[in-house]
Image (spheres, grey):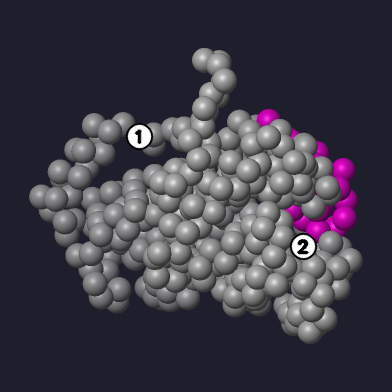
């Protein structure tokens, strides 16, 4: 059975934290009027009747690969939409009929790898994707996901290898070109990435694909120091089809530029997922807004709840480091967490965070660590260079 081919990104700045929803110990909010918006709730993906039907069918035949993968996909969509880790656990439970990955059907193996990716088990996800492409060398989605994970880990040569394999699949030509172009941009060939993205955007593409390409272009222009072009691409993407990833990537771009009020304006209409509350607390702290203390308290409660789970701090060290650095103003703690984070993931934001925490903590050895890591990876980012 073939799986629908989609453009897949690992969330970076907009990472779904997997922390709890509204924390039990958050301060109650007292609206001042009936017109005041208390919270924007995430939409429900699909109908509940469809979900109940799917659960019944799966319960009657849990070894049906199509049913198991479909139910796991439904749960994972809910986990992403709501930032609720229980749904990721339910997704894994839907796949439990195949405890031996070597014997799992292709669709189940891909779904398992995708859930592991969501949970930041990048090595486990990659191992299952490599199993899958060994069986199915023409599996485009598996190669694209593998390329993305290796990029997140800072393993650009391995990501290139997956991009090249993707290029050998006729139906995946656009994704292969974008995959290779993004890696070129990370290495500093900004002009080549820019040209590739603009060429791809010249075709007739679905809105979601255009948003993916425009966001990649925006992030590339930000690393190149072309802030006006980066902002233009971000705004074009959000006009086409707003999504949380692009919105929060834009927020982080604005934050780096010191434009905290603009960042707050982007954040306010968004559903209060963990990633959004984190950035609301950060922007509010910098601007000393009336709601900053409430957002910070809520985020602390979410962090405390999350850290009750095994390995939560390791998986979400990036976000906890950001909070420690900006909101709690504890640079030494932020540096400890930033170091923990780069052991797991090494995207541009992760190296920036390490360098920022090292500078704030007055830790020259950590600055040298960040410099070595930048040089070993071969990443080029003018914002990072300015810190190192």
Direction from residue 381 to residue 152 in the image, left or right: left
Q: Which residues are magenta?
A: 217-239
Taken as a whole, is the magenta stretch helix, strand or loop?
A: helix
Q: First in sequence, mark 2 or 1: give its number.
A: 1
Residue 32 picture quarter: top right
- Give the vertical position of 233 relative to 366 (above or below): above
Crowd tier of the residue under label 1, counting other residues whose Cα lies within 10 Å: few below 14, some 14–19, many 20 or above: few
Q: Secondary structure at mark 2?
A: helix
Q: Position of residue 185 (x, y in %)?
A: 77, 62
Quarter where residue 106 is shown: bottom left
Q: Is residue 5 left or right of residue 386?
A: left
Q: Position of residue 22 (x, y in %)?
A: 44, 43
Q: Position of residue 371 (x, y in %)?
A: 80, 79
What residue lies at 81% left-to-right and 58% top-to-bottom?
A: 223
Q: Secondary structure at mark 1?
A: loop
According to the picture, the residue beneath numbered tag 2 turns out to be 185
**In the displayed structure image, the side of residue 349 where residue 11 appears, left or right:** left
């Amino acid at each position: 059975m073939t799986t629908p081919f989609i453009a897949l990104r690992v969330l970076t700045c907009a990472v779904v934290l997997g922390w709890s929803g509204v924390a039990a110990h958050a301060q109650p909010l007292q609206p001042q009027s009936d017109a005041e918006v208390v919270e924007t709730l995430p939409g429900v993906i699909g109908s509940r009747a469809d979900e109940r039907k799917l659960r019944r069918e799966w319960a009657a035949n849990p070894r049906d690969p199509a049913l198991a993968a479909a139910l796991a996909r439904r749960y994972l969509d809910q986990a992403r939409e709501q930032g609720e880790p229980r749904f990721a656990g339910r997704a894994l439970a839907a796949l439990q009929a195949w405890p031996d990955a070597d014997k799992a059907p292709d669709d189940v193996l891909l779904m398992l790898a995708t859930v592991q990716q969501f949970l930041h088990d990048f090595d486990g996800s990659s191992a299952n994707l490599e199993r899958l492409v060994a069986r199915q060398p023409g599996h485009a989605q598996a190669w694209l996901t593998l390329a993305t994970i290796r990029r997140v880990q800072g393993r650009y040569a391995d990501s290139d290898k997956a991009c090249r394999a993707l290029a050998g699949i006729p139906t995946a030509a656009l994704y292969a070109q974008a995959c290779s172009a993004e890696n070129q941009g990370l290495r500093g060939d900004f002009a080549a990435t820019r040209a590739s993205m603009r060429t791809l955007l010249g075709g007739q593409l679905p809105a979601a694909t255009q948003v993916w390409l425009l966001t990649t272009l925006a992030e590339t222009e930000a690393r190149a120091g072309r802030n006006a072009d980066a902002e233009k691409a971000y705004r074009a993407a959000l006009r086409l089809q707003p999504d949380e990833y692009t919105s929060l990537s834009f927020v982080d771009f604005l934050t780096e530029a010191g434009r905290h009020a603009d960042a707050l304006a982007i954040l306010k209409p968004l559903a209060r997922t963990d990633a959004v509350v984190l950035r609301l607390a950060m922007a509010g702290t910098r601007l000393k807004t009336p709601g900053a203390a409430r957002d910070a308290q809520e985020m602390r409660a979410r962090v405390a709840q999350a850290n009750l789970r095994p390995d939560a701090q390791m998986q979400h060290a990036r976000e906890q480091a950001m909070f420690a650095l900006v909101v709690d103003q504890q640079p030494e703690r932020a540096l400890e967490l930033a170091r923990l984070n780069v052991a797991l993931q090494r995207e541009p934001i992760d190296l920036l965070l390490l360098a920022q925490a090292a500078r704030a903590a007055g830790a020259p050895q950590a600055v040298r660590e960040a410099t070595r890591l930048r040089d070993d990876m071969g990443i080029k980012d003018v914002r990072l260079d300015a810190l190192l």
